[in-house]
Amino acid sequence: MEGQTVTVINRSEIVGRPLAAMLANDGADVYSVDIESIYLFRGGRLYKCSDDETVESCVRKSSVVITGVPTKSYRLPTEWVREGTTVVNVASFKNVDEALLLKIPGVTYVPMVGKVTVAMLERNLMRLFENFHHPDVRLRAAVAGRGEEKEEEERVVVQRPPWYGSPIQLYNAVALTALLAITVMRSK
């Protein structure tokens, strides 16, 4: 991404902000656009853009545009997208008119990767839980803090089966919950 200009539309804590930071760490100049403001991630730093900078001016400069606006009503105006741009939609809704976008020469469009995003978030959530909040992890930390006299108790804890039965049961529960939530949100 070195030397590329990217615009990320939506600065959410889950996707937009971390994605902008990761792309900037890879060498891109990243405009992070939200309802109230525009920031530029560059060289490991965050700069607030002047009021002269608009969503349109950011998109027109960008070779990559990423939309993640979680509403049906938002559409990226295709007139802003220049030739040869890559447009990625990470929202669960189409944030761009695909037919109009693909009429622009050289445009690459990646539609609706929302389900992939949800799956990766589920995986990261499970890892966070297992690494920091699982009862076995907390008990081991408490035992380690009391000294070595509790080694036997720690061995017993390690041999305990997980509270959720198996990892696949946990994954299925989280996946079904997420899909149900998405379905309910779409029906509103």
Image (tube, rainbow, N blue to C red):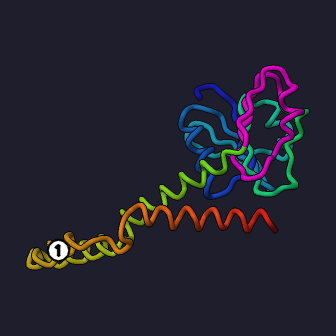
Occupied quadrant, residue 81? top right
Q: Quadrant of the C terminus?
A: bottom right
Left or right: 164, with 70 as reference point? left
Q: Quadrant of the N terminus?
A: top right
Q: Position of residue 150 (x, y in %)?
A: 12, 78
Between residues 130 and 59, which one lies in front from this camera angle? Answer: 130
Give the labeled residue for mark 1.
154
Main SS, magenta region, reads loop
**Disc 1 secondary structure class:** helix
The stretch in magenta equals 82-111
Q: Residue at x 69, y 62 (%)?
A: 182
Q: Residue at x 73, y 68 (%)?
A: 184
Q: Amino acid at mark 1?
A: Glu
Q: Position of residue 36 (x, y in %)?
A: 80, 57
Q: Residue at x 17, y 79 (%)?
A: 146
Left or right: 89, with 177 as reference point? right
Between residues 66 and 41, which one lies in front from this camera angle? Answer: 66
Left or right: 8, with 119 as reference point? right
